[in-house]
Image (spheres, coloured by chain):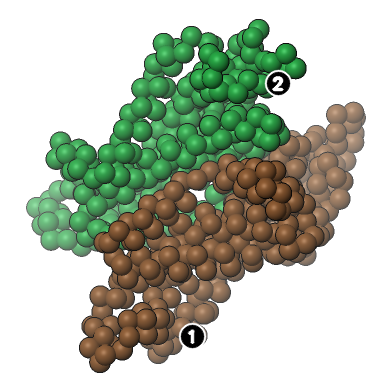
Amino acid sequence: MRVLRELVRRPSALFGLIVVVIVLLAAIFAPWIVHFSPNDQLADGLSLEGAPLPPGNGHLFGTDTLGRDLFARVLFGARTSLIIGLVANGVAVAIGLLVGLLAGYLRGTAGNLLMRFTDLMMAFPALLLAIALAALLKPSLWIVAMVIALVNWVQVARIVYTETRGLVERDFIVAERSLGAGNSRIILFHILPHLMPTAIVWGTLGIATTVLLEATLSFLGIGVQPPQPSWGNIIFESQSYFQDAPWLVFIPGAIILATALSFNLIGDALRDILDPTQRGRL
Amino acid sequence: MVAFLARRLVQAVLILLGVAAITFLLLYYLPADPAVLIAGRSATPQMVAAIRHELGLDQSLVMQFLHYVGNLLHGDLGRSYTQKTEVLPLILARLPATLVLMAAGIAVEVALGLTFGIIAAVRRGGFVDRAIMMLSFVGVSSPQFVVALLLLYVFAATLGWFPMSGFGTARHVVLPALTLGVLGAGWYARMVRSAMIEVLRQDYVRTAHAKGLSGRRVVLSHALPNALLPIIAMVGIDIGQFMSGVVVVEAVYGWPGIGQLAWQAIQQVDVPIIMGVTLVSALAIVLGNLLADFIAPFVDPRIRSQ
């Protein structure tokens, strides 16, 4: 509650929260907000010359090149993008926590091996690795989510590792161990709670990265496959018409930006609130 | 220091070996059967078997991996499924274009990032700082392909200042380099700012102020050189981010570099090319990190004396 109050007090975080709530509500209530189906090629969806309709005239965001309502596609696309954002990033943070915690707690050979593997993953450009994976596996919503999770856990692992290393040396952990507490008890009840702020901050910042990565993969044609709308593939489908029908590219583009920006702003504010030592840093 | 650099060199080699192991597994074990993919649809079982033998797919996993690494050391990155040629020459032919783009993009990124990062650090907490930080957030939150299309829409399609796509003259470089550089600058400015803030807190900066040096002098010749170290250390990550951006930017602007090669390979699921570009990028990142390690002692005498 304290955290929420502090968030609302910061203008940038408040802006982020409002946008995120709007996008969430839009995604959840999409079928009730718009009465067009996202995949319906409407009879009146194209001009007499067969061109897509600009925003207005009963179509809030206009229509796309197949005569589908863009507002409906963007709303339903929000579902796809957010599901991937939440699932992929949730999995990434979970993997990162697990690897970082184990490496930091075990140290020794096992810990070293885990961290060298993390370094190895750092050497891959995330997008290219995701492209390779997505090209090899048949792209679908869940595959895309898993691919993103597989390339995004690395940073979390590194940070959790450093924090765990610090925690293990602390007196209260040493005391707990000398009282006879087992490893699992120490990890679950004494180390994990201290890592929660990190998990929450990265759980938020990571959604921005994930939404952008999903959009980029879909834009390259290896993300979520049409006709299922996602913000990236809406742009992918209309990119060659961007001169004649700029709204098809720039409306979803602005929404991707607003969403990623909002998660970044909230994450940044959370970092300030939850970890005062990091205040004003990156 | 020599021992430190030697250890880094060994680490870099080990990481490259690991990278090779992962690309190897992706190339030869994830697809159902690469021999079938290479042979094409009209192949007879005998042809597939011949290709399997030729690729060494009938050998054990370890033998295949050693064979693969041996090939890599000879510059053999495998054959493209669709273009029926070696992957390495394809990549080498397109590398110069990508290097030009990266150099221009990094120049934009460093110039903007340094300037804005320093200004923000000096004006820490003020309006200018907050405005710059907000802008940098917009930069890191922007989908690159949308910005690329936006720049094309405004400066090429509407104003006609720059060509829509292609390669050759200096005017072709401007928009792609801006797309890469401006967005990268958002991230870079934050790095520079936090490094500078750390340094500006130090006692010797207060001393420099106290001896009456001008603010500009203190910041540029006393604080900045010490803030450079963490910034240089980020070179590897920076190259990684650029390599990812290059795929998108080259695809949108029709820039004939390795990013476009990868993008075209995606459409045809030409995995050896994708993995080739990934390998080259990973090599660039590892070399970037290594370069940072080697530059660091020249920038910071403390490391030299260790």
The residue nearer to you, when weighing A185 against B113, is B113
Residue lying furthest front: B159
Amino acid at the residue labelled 2: Ala
* Quadrant location of the N terminus of chain A in the rendered image: top left
For the colour brown, the matching chain is B
Q: Chain of mark 2?
A: A
Who is closer to the viewer here, A167 or B33?
A: A167
| Residue to which mark 1 is pinned | B298
In front: label 1 or label 2: 2
What is the x, y in percent for residue A207? 41, 39
Which mark, by number, is residue A51? 2
Q: Residue at x 85, y 29 (%)?
A: B41
Mark 1 neighbour density, 10 Å: few (under 14) some (14–19) many (20 or more): few
Which residue type carries mark 1? Answer: Phe
Query: If the image is split into quadrants, where does the C terminus of chain A sit?
Result: bottom left
Q: Residue at x 27, y 61 (%)?
A: B126
Q: Which mark is residue B151?
A: none
Q: Colour of chain A?
A: green
Specify the subunit that label 1 lies on. B
Residue B118: x and y, percent?
39, 70
What is the x, y in percent for residue A38? 55, 16
Q: Is residue B186 above or below residue B111?
A: above
Disc 1 from disc 2: Cα separation: 61 Å
